[in-house]
Image (spheres, rainbow, N blue to C red):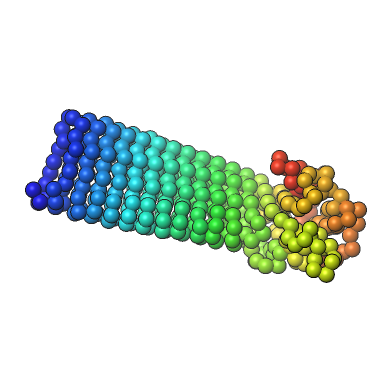
Amino acid sequence: NAGNDWQDGGKQDDLVTDNGGNDTLYGGSGDDTVKGGDDNDELHGGANDDLLCGENGDDTIDGDTGDDTAYGGEGEDLLRGGDGEDCLHGEEGDDRLLGGKEDDKLDGGTGDDTLNGQSGNDFLHGGNDNDSMLGEAGNDMMCGGSGADTMKGGSQDDTLIGGDQGDKLYGDGNEDKLLGEDGKDTLDGGKGNDFLCGGSDNDTIIGGDQDDTMVGDGRHGFYGGPGVPDEFVNGGEHYEHDMGSRGSDTFVFNVTAIGDGGKDDDGDSSYLDSLGFASEDIILDPEAVDILKFIVDQPGIESAADLDPHVFVVDDGQDVTIYFNRDGDHSWTGDAEDSIVLKGMGIAPGHAGIDSLVELKGSINILVV
């Protein structure tokens, strides 16, 4: 009938379909296929592994028990996986997806969707538009896709990956990995020993409590945790902030060569300019960071041994100055364009120098006091 009907497939592997109207459809026992129609339907998979398709309308879909696959279709749908390892696809419209127990896969599709993995180690993909994702319990992975998304990991070790716009990523508890990707992102590790990488554009990176590693490319605002913000300048292009932290935070700056082998248009060889900095100081609160690392990606610099002759680090008791010299003779002229001054920072005894990274790129590693 074309009215508001109720159907139950029973114990076998059934095909239960909508006949028009706002229907309630149950697959029952068995591996069932349950399909809605053009109106606002309610679909239940029941026991075993079911396929549920909402089609048009604002549908409510429950997988119940078993490993179910559900598609919302058009409209603003509610999909609940229930027990089992479920795959939920919101498709078109602003949908709400709830994974339920065990390890689920959620894909919002188009529209401003809300995804909640709930229990288990879940995979959440926002899809297009501006989505909101919550991992809750388990070691979850979240990918924003297109749009300005908001992601929160939950209580365990989560991986959050932004997308092409300005996303907000919150690690919450435990050891999380937050990758901003493109856009002006905000990354907050929360509790635990987190790894945070802003990606491209001007990002804000908040380590939170405990021992965090924060990676920027010179266009990021860093916040280690509770404290008073201080301004610093990197490259003379962007103004950022830095806060102290309760943990041992490592701030990593990637400096990449520009121009022809680092030479300026007038033939001079300002080594600092070749690393992408201008004649500006970097100003930091000495309580804000425990390790300051500069990773150098420069032609001819393939190891710490290659970098060492070109860099000299001086602590005058008030500031730390890093001098760069292309000739490799450990000399410098004092030109501001060939140095980075770290205001108000000191070097812990025996901990200033050049370290080597696994990828054999040279790096300056300073333990701050």
Which residue is farthest bottom? 266
Image side of residue 182 versus residue 298, left or right: left
As rendered, which of 290 and 214 lies closer to the eye? Answer: 214
As rendered, which of 261 and 110 lies closer to the eye? Answer: 261
Could you tell me which residue is drawn at 85 percent across and 53 percent down?
Answer: 310
As rendered, which of 133 and 55 lies closer to the eye? Answer: 55
Image side of residue 16 versus residue 163, left or right: left
Residue 295: percent from left, percent from top: 72, 50
Up/down of 181 relative to 358, above or below: below
Counting every numbered tag in the picture gives 0
Residue 308 visible at all: yes
Image side of residue 247 versus residue 82, left or right: right
Residue 237: percent from left, percent from top: 67, 67
Could you tell me which residue is drawn at 11 percent across and 47 percent down?
Answer: 5
Could you tell me which residue is drawn at 64 percent across and 55 percent down?
Answer: 216
Q: Quadrant of residue 271?
A: bottom right
Residue 22: percent from left, percent from top: 16, 51
Up/down of 6 relative to 255, above or below: above
Residue 349: percent from left, percent from top: 82, 46
Up/down of 336 relative to 48, above or below: below
Could you tell me which residue is drawn at 71 percent across and 64 percent down?
Answer: 235
Residue 367 visible at all: no
Image side of residue 196 versus residue 15, left or right: right
Q: Quadrant of residue 355?
A: top right
